[in-house]
Amino acid sequence: MSDRLFFSLILIVLGPPIALLLLRYVFGFDVGINPFRVKCPSCSAKMPYVRAPMNERQEMWGGCTCHKCGTEMDKWGKEIAPE
């Protein structure tokens, strides 16, 4: 395998995750995957590792609803105001 092909494959595989990390941690955008457990901003209850989305926004962008107090939050644990 040539060096050019090898580096192209590495860039294709590692490029998108690195771009997401840069957008999240360097520029502050709320994109990417949160691998950590979050706590409810209202009652500090830990959210489950495996989430069950309650609406379309949670299905598409992540997040969950607290099973104790009903607070809706995004995948980073920030409260989302009810619509």
Image (spheres, rainbow, N blue to C red):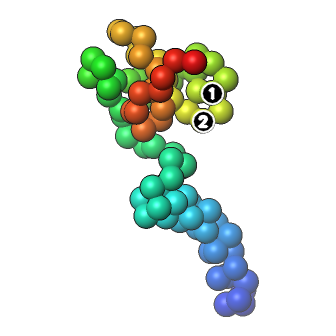
Query: Where does residue 57 sit, x and y in percent of width and height?
Result: 63, 27
Query: Where does residue 48 sit, x and y in percent of width and height?
Result: 40, 23
Q: Secondary structure at mark 1?
A: helix
Residue pushed farthest left? 44
Q: Quadrant of residue 52?
A: top right
Q: Which residue is mark 2?
A: 61
Q: Which quarter of the rendering shows the N terminus?
A: bottom right
Q: Is residue 8 left or right of residue 71?
A: right
Q: Residue at x 36, y 9 (%)?
A: 69
Q: Secondary structure at mark 2?
A: helix
Q: Is residue 82 above or below residue 20?
A: above
Q: Which residue is mark 1?
A: 57
Query: Where does residue 83 sit, x and y in percent of width and height?
Result: 57, 18
Q: Residue at x 59, y 27 (%)?
A: 58
Q: Is residue 20 left or right of residue 12?
A: left
The amino acid beneath tag 2 is: Trp
Q: Is residue 45 visible?
A: no
